[in-house]
Image (cartoon, grey):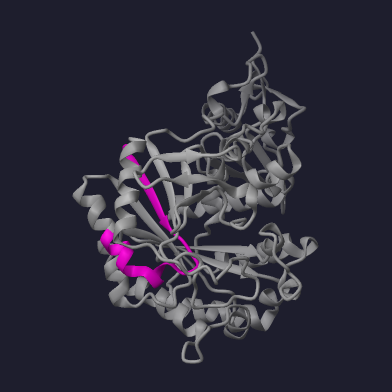
């Protein structure tokens, strides 16, 4: 009986310089085929392959490997239900985004969407309420992210809260999104002792661009120098269990030849490319002010327009990748539910010092984002907005989409709510560039 195979929906491909790149979203395996005569070059979603037609031992073993590695599927087989993960993360995990210093910040970034006048801070009694809330949720693990504003403006709370988590035998992981300006060696040690092992720090290109975008409220603080020092402190630390995402908010100026060359040189002087505790994460500067119902007139000139966003991101990613750095985006893209927004999970909460709870960090001032409150005894009170964020916006097309594992139909609940329908992630329309990036990334990881 003839065995007829097809390329399944979870495999994407692209061709460049007579090389065929295949990426398997189901298992994160990838392959580059250099032989132009290889039968895999004839494959597409429409074409099929008959294994018995290949008498060359070389090609036959390759075809068998492609079958074993799920790059090929019997035409008669139905869709594999196991490929699509459960949409919600386990109820045994609680995800808390805590604003210990409210939205207060020591920087005044041009494009920032937050209200820095809200400066109320969490105190010792607030940590008790949080502990009560966590206990009432009954989760086995708590994932905590300290957010702001600048969360390090309230280091005391972070230290005290971690001690209470430990005292109450609550298992937790912690990370922090910080501008880095307060991340001295001493504060790094305090954070590490408090269980904070994951960092996201933003540096917006070359010195002149960064200081123009990320403006310090103090004349005594050089924003760029401070962030560089923070990255140095992490790199020079002896902690191998730390990881740091270096976010680069970018626009067309960022990729200008002289700016980019200077910036990469600066980064290489701080972070060796083979220090895989660091991941590079370029992101186009977008209009988050409007999403948070704020006037964006002063920030418009800094935005990366939609027509150039892909180009800007690809140039930055390629430049850093060619220098030997690992990128954050491929990990997010291929991780199980990695591109599904936390806001869509029922057990994910943003908590401010007034103990109102929200779902999305980008739209804190939008009334639809207020979904309830944590009461003084730690009980959770939710309102009618809550179900809008946790609603399943996926549709039938999600079932045979290569991105289902990472997106789960939930890449941006805020847009889903505004449109009242599912909005697909942008990489779905960038199959060639995305496939190439992922194959090259995993090739480097496997050789590391």
Instruction: Work out which quarter of the rendered image holds the N terminus and state it.
Output: top right
- Residue furthest to the bottom: 220
> Is 242 left, or right, of 206 in this rendering?
left
Q: Residue at x 73, y 76 (%)?
A: 298
Viewer-proximal residue among 180 and 440? 180
Instruction: Work out which quarter of the rendered image holds the C terminus and state it.
Output: bottom left
Viewer-proximal residue among 22 and 225? 225
**Residue 286 seen in this snapshot:** no
Residue 344 quadrant:
top right
> Is 276 left, or right, of 67 in this rendering?
left
Q: Residue at x 67, y 66 (%)?
A: 285
- Residue furthest to the top: 1
State the image coordinates of residue 314 (x, y, percent, origin top left). 67, 62
Report the span colored magenta.
140-160
Q: Residue at x 62, y 63 (%)?
A: 283
Viewer-proximal residue among 358 and 280? 358
Q: Say above or below: 3 vs 187.
A: above
């Amino acid at each position: 009986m003839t065995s007829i195979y097809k390329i399944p929906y979870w495999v994407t491909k692209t061709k460049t310089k007579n090389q065929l790149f295949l990426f398997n979203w189901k298992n994160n395996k990838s392959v580059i085929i250099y032989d132009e005569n290889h039968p895999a070059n004839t494959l597409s979603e429409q074409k099929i392959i008959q294994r018995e037609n290949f008498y060359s031992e070389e090609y036959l073993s390759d075809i068998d490997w492609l079958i074993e590695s799920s790059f090929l599927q019997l035409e008669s087989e139905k869709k594999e239900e196991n490929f699509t993960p459960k949409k919600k993360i386990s109820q045994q995990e609680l995800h808390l985004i805590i604003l210990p210093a409210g939205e207060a910040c020591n920087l005044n970034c041009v494009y920032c969407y937050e209200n820095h006048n809200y400066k109320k801070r969490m105190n010792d009694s607030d940590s008790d309420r949080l502990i009560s809330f966590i206990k009432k949720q009954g989760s086995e693990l708590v994932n905590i992210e300290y957010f702001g504003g600048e969360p390090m403006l309230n280091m005391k709370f972070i230290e005290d809260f971690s001690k209470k988590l430990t005292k109450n035998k609550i298992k937790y992981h912690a990370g922090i999104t910080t501008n880095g300006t307060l991340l001295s060696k001493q504060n790094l040690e305090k954070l590490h002792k408090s269980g904070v092992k994951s960092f996201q720090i933003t540096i917006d290109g070359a010195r002149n661009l960064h200081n123009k975008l990320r403006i310090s409220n103090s004349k005594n603080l050089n924003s760029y120098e401070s962030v560089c020092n923070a990255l140095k402190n992490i790199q020079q630390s002896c902690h191998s269990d730390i990881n740091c995402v270096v976010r680069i908010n970018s626009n067309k100026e960022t990729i200008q030849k002289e700016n980019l060359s200077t910036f990469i040189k600066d980064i290489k002087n701080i972070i060796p490319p083979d220090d895989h505790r660091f991941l590079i994460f370029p992101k186009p500067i977008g209009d988050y002010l409007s999403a948070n119902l704020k006037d964006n007139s002063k920030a418009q000139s800094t935005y990366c327009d939609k027509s150039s966003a892909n180009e800007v991101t690809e140039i930055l990613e390629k430049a850093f990748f060619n220098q030997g750095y690992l990128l954050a985006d491929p990990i997010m893209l291929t991780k199980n539910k990695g591109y599904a927004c936390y806001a869509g999970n029922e057990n994910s909460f943003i908590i401010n010092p007034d103990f109102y709870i929200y779902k999305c960090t980008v739209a804190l001032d939008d009334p639809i984002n207020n979904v309830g409150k944590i009461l003084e005894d730690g009980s959770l009170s939710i309102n009618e907005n809550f179900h809008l964020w946790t609603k399943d916006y996926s549709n039938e097309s999600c079932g045979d989409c290569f991105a289902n594992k990472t997106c789960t139909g939930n890449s941006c609940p805020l847009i889903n709510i505004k449109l009242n329908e599912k909005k697909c992630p942008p990489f779905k329309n960038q199959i060639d560039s995305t496939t190439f990036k992922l194959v090259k990334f995993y090739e480097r990881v496997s050789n590391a």
